[in-house]
Amino acid sequence: MDDLVLPSIFRVADFATWTVAAAHTQAAAFLTARNGAGTTPQVSITPREAAIAFRSERYLRLNGEPTFDWAPLSGDYQTTDGWIRLHCNFDHHAAIACQVLGVPQDRSALEAAVRRRNRFELEDAITEAGGVAAAMRSRTEWAAHEQSQALAKQPLVALTPIAGGETFAAICAATNSDRARPASRNHNTNTNTNHLPRPLSGIRVLDLTRIIAGPNAGRVLAAYGADVTMIRSPLLPTIRGLDLDLNFGKSLRFLDLRSAAGHSTFLDLVRSADIVLQSYRPGALAALGLGPSDLAALNPRLIYASISAYGTTGPWAARRGFDSLVQMAVGIADEGMQASSAPRPVPLPAQVLDHAAGWLTAAGAIEALNRGGGLTVDVSLAGVSAALDRLGRWDPSIGLAVPDPALSDVEGLLLHTPTSAGTLTHVRFPGRIPGAEIGWSGPPPIV
């Protein structure tokens, strides 16, 4: 039972351990090569550490108080033929959902309106209006979906030469840990690399992400010692509680990439960057002249790492999505409901797809550094769900019997960091890399 950690039929702790180990192994190999130390050390991570790190936002406290909760209209709604999840954590997404359904922003009114609609029809209507929704599908329904079939052709962590060439699977995404090693040592560095204790010391990262998956990738790179700068638009909403949890060790800069000044300033930053990390929908930045080939023209060794909801090809490639929605779409919530005999969808006990995507994107980016740069790295939440699916299941009588750990149960995995706004209680960076110093250099810049 100690290896299960969180209540679920899915092998969440095993999966979390594997993704954290993948990133640690790449970081260890990169540090070993930079220091000329020979054999890459064996990294270590316990299932408990990894699983608790995967729900870090749940344990975050500012001066002892929780910092994040779902917006009142976000959640699962029953339709005429099943269930649908509406994402309303941003005000404009809530407004779109209510506009499509012709009701005020009231939970009871929204529930009544949704009960009169078909799940797939409503999913399409909200999506086409610019909102965010996902109908609950069974595993069978998702397997038959065209997007699922397109996704099956894409590697879990896909690397593609920006200058042209075939897409290939990152070694870090191999399920055999013995293969989780870099392919070459032709890496790019920006500083003297003799006997550095921080794996990514001197590596510069521009982080254009929000919510969980992308910020977690940047948070992981920052914990390895990278200089990570968040690039935030002053025009786009964000969620303060998540910003506090997922941006330790980073700096912050506000730029409107759609303005001439912001666009020019960002390009200046790209010239000296090693990694650009972004989680806009596929093609969104390219439309602004900030796609991989655009930036590689300024910096040929740049690594362009992207996280999407449903992958880069297929009919849903440009669809908005979040972890809780993808769990509905791919059959996870339905399977959880069936296994627990519950009357409504049962999600994973953490935002597993988000956190795993962050760790795997960080691992892929470091592997791209080991390969000399000039690569794109692509990870999708739906692709991560397929990898989780392949690990198999626990018997419900075992997996669902695991106690859900409260804040008091994880005290040994917490740190207490002072900030200008008060004390942040947060989950520490998990695992160990022998001979390396890992962990965040300071609190998040948004307090």
Image: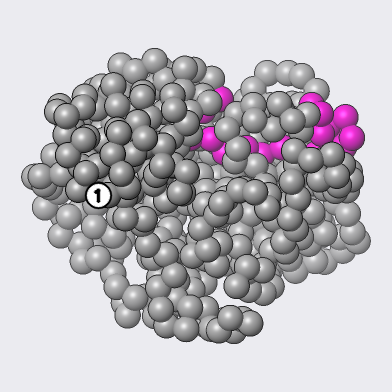
Q: Is residue 264 left or right of residue 329?
A: right
The residue under label 1 is 107
Which quadrant of the rendered structure holds the C terminus? bottom right
Give percent across and percent down for residue 338: 13, 39
Q: Which amino acid is tagged 1?
A: Arg
**Front residue of 24 and 254:** 254
Q: Residue 258, position in %: x, y?
A: 75, 38
Q: Quadrant of residue 390?
A: top left
Q: From the top left corner, tell me how far across and down residue 138 is, in percent.
A: 23, 29
Nearest the eye: 86 or 275: 86
Q: Quadrant of residue 281?
A: top right
Q: Secondary structure at mark 1?
A: helix
Residue drawn 71% across and 52% down? Answer: 231
**Observer-nearest of 148 and 37:** 148
297 within the magenta span: yes
Residue displayed at 86% across by 60% down? 193
Give the image quarter of residue 262.
top right
Q: Is residue 133 magenta?
A: no
| Bounds of the magenta segment | 293-312
Residue 166 appears in view:
yes
Where 304 falls versus 203 (above or below)? above
